[in-house]
Amino acid sequence: MSANTYDAIVIGSGISGGWAAKELTEKGLKTIMLERGRNIEHIKDYVNANKDPWEFPHRGGRTQKMIDDYPVLKRDYPLNETNLDYWASDKDSPYTEVKRFDWFRGYHVGGRSLMWGRQSYRWADVDFEANLKDGIAVDWPIRYKDVAPWYSYAEKFAGISGNKDGLAILPDGDFMPPMEMNCVEKDVAKRLKDHYKEARDMIIGRTANITVPHNNRTNCQYRNKCWLGCPFGAYFSTQSATLPAAMATGNLTVRPWSIVTKILYDKDTKKAKGVEVLDAETNQTYEYFAKIVFVNASTINSAWILMNSATDVWDGGLGSSSGELGHNLMDHHLGVGASGRYEGFEDKYYFGRRANGFYIPRFANLGGDKRDFIRGFGYQGGANREGWSRDIAELNIGGAFKDALTEPGSWSVGMGGFGETLPYHDNKVTIDKTKKDKWGLPVVAIDAELKDNEKKMRIAMENEGKAMLEAAGVKDVQTHSSNPFLGRGIHEMGTARMGRDPKTSVLNQWNQVWDAKNVFVTDGSFMVSSACQNPSLTYMAMTARAANYAVEALKKNEI
Amino acid sequence: MHRRTVIKNLALIIGGAALLPSCLQEKGKASIGLKNVDVSADQEKLIGDIAETIIPKTNTPGAKDLQLHLFVLKMVDDCYTKKDQQDFMTGMGQFNDLINKRYGRVFGDCDTKQREQTLLSIEQNKDPKITTYSTELKIFYGIVKNQTINGYTTSKYFMTKQVVYELVPGRYNAFYPVKMKQAV
């Protein structure tokens, strides 16, 4: 075996890439994981994780220089001084926005598994059946029963804490003990259940934070500083979970600074033989060879790699024969919600910072519920006591004001919606050859927008949020609805969808590229619809499922 | 360690490396290096006096003990837009002129009552529709107040002595009596 030849290549090291590397190496395949950015070593490189709030010169805020340096990241919460090193440079890696698309990227080992929101929900049958039922896009080639065992497999390894709530729309999983709702959240949950006669639920979030020790990882210490990297390894990330498992096999090589520019396609065998890599530090080009390639570069970059590959056979790139590669880009639309003041429980507080909140599963267009849009939305939220910014009547300055700053304010309850975005053929990414990144590579152009169905849904998200909080006794309920743009959900999906027919889909039911059976795409690209649940758990399960299939197929010499 | 020494040391820690007074301080210039706003020693003192009126020394340290005015200046210098910085400087000048006209002296030489009355009057007229005070003056005061409180409630002193902050709580207690103060 030559130095650059492996059994398997994994492109990308985020949530799905880490899973691919773990599964393939544990099944005995010599694997190289290629990561375009720098290495981040577990614990050692979490440079801000053990800082106290007062150690940040701007207390975690953003400076004008940061705002100038990050014209995209500044559009939402990710831009702050506590974990700036984890976000890709907008200037080094520009892209073209045909329409505004907020693309927040993590270019380093671990990818966005280091900064993700960790909410982990299974999909239900209604989600996999939705496209068929509504007659839009294409049908999922799989159903819940195909994924269910792999959900269990992923949950058991990743460590998902949650309560078995017994809801049809949100199937229970193999959970660790749930985190707890505080007194106000419990009260609101009960009032909602009573008011809507059990047709709506408010549950504790199901999160990839472990609540009991697991695989040499320490259980969550309630710091709520996950986005800095966890010194306890208490939340699932490539670094805390899949990477150590893959390394333990002795079969994994990790190569940081490796930008995969194309998959090398062999016309004769109709298979990929490897990949071309541009070293991001030296600008040298290398080739790596393997029997199978897993593409996990994240939804938009995976499409970019495929579009750059095998262009001598297909103008649009590898997987483009259906005309769907790069199309059907989805995200969850958000920025809509409600909040208000909760009276009572003044003598109650909470101790510890829970890295989790409550979740209200989808209810729209389910049961007897009918709307002027299809599909639905869920909410994430929490109740907490406000700090100094509360109104202290007549105490604006002076000693009494100073004393009052040490008292907790009133309880507030807030929540924001996550809405399903439909797969539209004309929401797409293409390659913009007129613009180059720091390495001279052509950039992607993103052309996607919310359409009628999402816009109608956002009105319902706002109104229902208000109605539910008011029904739960929350006072002075205010709503918000802003920035109706895609991308800011940081749940990009759909650019290489699965399907039952090579004429209308890029991948088959095993995440195999129809046009190159030894290439598997298992990041968000494969999604055929978006549902409204946070998608990462589904990527984990589907990656493990595809890796299992790939290794079986290799053994049988099918690929 | 004596309490006073503790507080003095704390102030240095809170100030942080970036706020250490410059050894090559120009006469009449602010005591910390600023890149984007030109603040004089007198203006630095004014901000310190306003901050001290908002968070006065009582039986616990006040704004000056904790060097909160230096935090205010650092935030103005690094985190605000050019326009905000200009308004801040203009508003500061107008604030000075107003005090001079009203009391015939600088803010720091006014008695506590005069200082408190001035700030409360600005608070009461903060509605943009009320023109008792100029927009710039209100922006200036708003920034000083916000950042004084931000600096105070996130200072090591506050988070360790006034409330209980733990870097590693280790547990979540969903029903906690309010007696025990906690920063989250």
Image (tube, coloured by chain):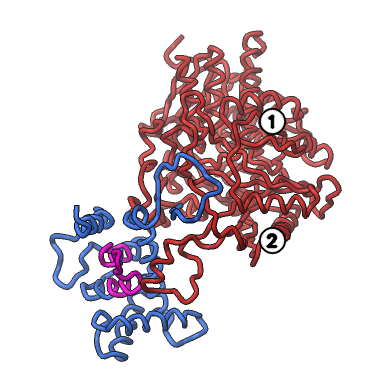
Chain colours: A red, B blue
Disc 2 crowd, CA 10 A, few/some/many (<14, 14-19, 20+)? some
Q: Nearer the viewer, mark 2 or mark 1?
A: 2
Of label 2 and label 1, which has the lower sequence position? Answer: 2
Question: Which residue position holds label 2?
Answer: A473
Question: Between residues A493 and A433, which one lies in front from this camera angle?
Answer: A493
Q: Is residue A38 left or right of residue A155?
A: left
Say which element carries label 2: loop
What chain does mark 1 sit on? Answer: A
Residue at point 48%, 46% (across, down)? A352
Dot 2 and dot 1 within a common chain: yes
> Residue A204, percent across and down?
63, 43
Q: Which of the pair B141/A500 is nearer the observer?
A: B141
Is the C-beta separation of discs 2 and 1 under 8 Å?
Answer: no
Question: In this picture, which residue range is highlighted in magenta?
Answer: B47-72
Q: Amino acid at mark 2?
A: Gly
Q: What's the residue at 40%, 55% (across, down)? A: B163
Residue that carries the numbered disc 1 in the rendered image: A506
Which of B41/B174 is in front? B174
Left or right, A479 with reference to B27: right
The answer to whether any part of residue A16 appears in the image is: yes
Q: Amino acid under label 1?
A: Val
Q: Quadrant of residue B50?
A: bottom left
User: Quick one: SS at disc 1?
Assistant: loop
Asked whether residue A39 is in view, the answer is no
Does A541 sit above or below residue A88?
Answer: above
> Does A465 appear in magenta?
no
